Image (spheres, rainbow, N blue to C red):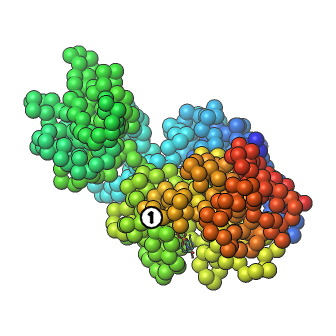
Amino acid sequence: MFPRVILKGTMIKKSQQKKKTSPCNYKERFFVLDTQDLKYSERRPGKKPMLKGCIELSKIKCVEIVCSEIPIPCNYKYPFQVFHNNHYLYIFAPDNDCRQRWVKALKEETKRNNLVAKYHPNFWMDGKWKCCQQTEKLAPGCHVYDPVGYASKKPLPQLPDPEMGLRDAGQMKVIALQDYAPLGDDDLPLHKDKEYILIKSSHSDWWAVQDDKGNTGFVPSIYVAEKSSNNFQRFEWYNKNITRGEAEVLLMKQGKEGSFMVRDSRQAGVYTVSVFTKAAGSNGEKNPRVKHYQIRQTETGEATYYLAEKYLFSTIPELIYYHQHNAAGLITRLRHPVSQDGGCSQDIADHSKDQWEVDPEELTLGQELGSGQFGLVLEGRWRGKRVAVKMVREECMSDEEFKEEARVMMRLSHCKLVQLYGVRTRCSPMCLVFEFMDRGGGGGGNPREGKKGCLSQDTMLGMCLDVSEGMAYLESSNFLHRDLAARNCLVSKNNEVKISDFGMTRFVLDDQYTSSQCSKFPVKWSAPEVIKYCKFSSKSDVWSFGVLMWEVYNEGRLPYENRTNGEVVESLNSGLRLLKPRLAPDAVHQLMEWCWKEKPEDRPSFAVLLHQLASLSDL
Ligand code: ADP
């Protein structure tokens, strides 16, 4: 209904040089991305920002990082491009994380547009494209554009040693399983399903290949498969000497939906895919079991292998790759390759999990910041950033369920949410790495820690606005917080508030906290339908937001301070509500009351609350 702000921040833009003679300059601008436009303005000390440009999102045809080795002539060194209305806008972010956030968000907002099929990965400079040397600025791109993939690429192996050289090794053909955009000068681009000649495979991670134009270069070996050959020993999902029974034991031990392997069938030359599932069987009951599918072959044709009739492939690696991404007739997608000697290894399909797994070597832990629901919270450093690390005590969290969900949570990215950067799941204890909230002297604080009488009207309204902005984002992402309260928000130095712990209550193992009848359940923040039937919705988050506004305008006082949970339920049932805080203007109190309507459908959405609060702040 209203444009919702998705990202904002300062970056540098290069002049778009719409006319041949327009000057080339780099200017710092404040960018705001909302659900309709990408706007940028000039910030002038003591004056209102001046809007300098506005690009309608619907006009954008490509957003991608720029890969270039040329020295960047401004302070921000991480370029990305926005191609719109036949113009190229180059924007420079201060760091790679920031660039990733912008590219990801812009791609997300424009993925349904009329996009380019190919784009230019390098700059337009001195009258030609640095990537393909074409001299026409509007010449079609030279690389396949991936409208969604940016954040989900499997990490690549270490780059090959340039000394390795390209030596001839026969005429074996390989086929590209997916596209690959070169990272270095010695690499060759791959185009999915195209054939290449394999010229060197002695290095296990990088193979040298030749394309049909005779260009040669390195590609990641996992991105290609030998054509018409069943040499797949090197794939982690293949277990050579394993019986059906042994496979079942291994897969059951993993106990993860979609754990799978390929093994030799008893019939020579035939292979079987064994996959673990917990899905309901034909009797409707959930029963963990291993299903076996024989890889079959048609009599004739080029593509002969199949698991489910309709989907034919010319090699087994291609078939497996396809089913890693599509169940297509199988009980489940092939999610986690399991190997005899390595347990459950990383899988191609779950790119994002790999990407977000924090490497213990990159994480250093420092002093204690506090202790929370799941255990200690420590200060730390990760990739040059200050972070807050939650060390999860095993008995406190249902970690299997969390790991599944962590991927979704890490994709949530908004300036009013405390960002989850990554998780360290492979070591014990499991750690959650969050954006650090600097409260000045004392670590991240929450709005309840403010000293009484310190907060101005502007500050209090600003805090509510911040939270409503973050919640409007969660609402639009169909994500429920379930435990919104001032204690779950953190305040930074300049009184900016960010929401934390979104969705986390689902993984708490303490029954006292999760059942509405028990002492630790946050009854005082919960909507009646949550207390009665545990019915969560974004409208139950809205109720909690009303209580949070009450906390803010009472400068951190606890709601229903001297009353038990039982007494609170009783007074809610008889229609009573928290009283108007002394510091709350009528308009704000009316919003609180709106949030506390008995019927969820009578409460406003966060988008409406955001709009209402924003209009109050303009007064
Ligand atoms: P939980 O919600 O898991 O119970 P909290 O989020 O309340 O735990 O964390 C406990 C304490 O750790 C907080 O009061 C705060 O001081 C500190 N803390 C938590 N997260 C951060 C963060 N992102 N930045 C700085 N300090 C933090």
What percent of the width, then of the height, locates residue 370?
52, 78
- 514 above or below 380? above
Residue receiving disc 1? 510
Describe residue 25's horizontal placement relative to residue 380 as left or right. Answer: right
The reply to whether the residue tagged 1 has its Cβ within 8 angstroms of ligand 1 is no
The one nearer the camera, 157 or 580, is 580
Describe residue 575's horizontal placement relative to residue 139 as left or right. Answer: right
**Image quadrant occupied by the N terminus:** top right
Task: Ligand 1: give its quadrant.
Answer: bottom right
Residue at coordinates 61% horizontally, 82% vertically from top-left? 442
Which three-letter amino acid code belongs to the residue tagged 1? Answer: Asp
- 504 above or below 262? below
Residue at coordinates 22% horizontally, 25% vertically from top-left? 296
Q: Quadrant of residue 290?
A: top left
Describe residue 599's horizontal placement relative to residue 318 as left or right. Answer: right
**Image quadrant occupied by the C terminus:** bottom right
